[in-house]
Image (tube, helix red, strand yellow):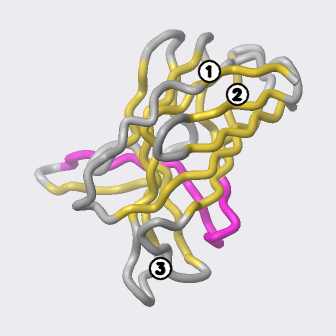
Amino acid sequence: MSRLVLSVSAVFVSLTVSLAAQAQVTVKDAWVRATVPQQKATGAFMQLQSAQDAKLISAQSPVAGVVEVHEMAMDGGVMKMRAVPSLALPAGKAVDLKPGGYHVMLMDLKGQVKDGDTVPVTLVVEGKDGKRQSVELKVPARTAAAPAMNHGAGQMHKH
C-alpha cells in the first residue's frame, strides 16, 4: 500500500509521497466542522481529484471511534444521510465532499473539536487496479460560519 502524507495549512497543501502512488490523489480546501462540548459527531469536507480512475473506500481519524464516507440525499421528500461503501473518483474530475452532500463523517468523538484545531484524517483510496493508497491529512477545524480558506492544490513530492 502506498502512503501519502498531506498537511493542510491556511496557506498551502503539501503532499509527501513515501512510495510512488498509483492514484495520485490531490486534496483541496479541506476542513472539519468544529463542535460544541458533548457533541459526538462532525463532518470533514474537501475536494478530491485523482489522476486515474479510483474510489475513496474508507477513512480513519484518531479523534473518532467511527469514521465513514457518507452521502446526504433526498429520499421521498426527506433528506437522509447514509454510509456508502465507496465514492467514485473519476480520472481528472474534482469530487466535492461538502455539507449537504458527500462527506467524511466522524462519529463517537473522543473530545470536542475546537475551532483552530488540527484534525488528523487518513483517507484510503483504491485504484482500478485494486491497489490501495493512504492519504494522511492534517485538517484545520473551523466553525461552519467561518469563511473557507483557499488552500490550493496538493503538490507531489517523491521521497
Q: Give the residue type that dot 2 points to.
A: Glu
Q: Which residue is mark 3?
A: 40
Which residue is nearer to you in this view: 12 or 123? 12
Rendered residue at 53%/64% (across/down): 106
Q: Which quadrant, please, contains the C terminus?
A: top right
User: Considering the numbered disc 3 on the image, is that residue within a helix, a strand or a loop?
Assistant: loop
Q: Left of 158 or right of it: where is 31?
A: left
Mark 2 and mark 3: Cα distance apart in space: 29 Å
Pick whichever of labels 2 and 3 is earlier in the sequence.
3
Q: Which quadrant, please, contains the N terminus?
A: top right
The quadrant where residue 62 appears: bottom right
Number of the label disc, if any, that sits on residue 126: 2
Q: Which residue is mark 1?
A: 54
Magenta stretch, residue numbers: 60-75
Mark 3 and mark 1: Cα distance apart in space: 31 Å
Q: Give the residue type that dot 3 points to.
A: Lys
User: Considering the numbered disc 2 on the image, is that residue within a helix, a strand or a loop?
Assistant: strand
Q: Residue furthest front?
A: 11
Pick whichever of labels 1 and 2 is earlier in the sequence.
1
Pick whichever of labels 3 and 1 is earlier in the sequence.
3
Q: Residue furthest bottom?
A: 38
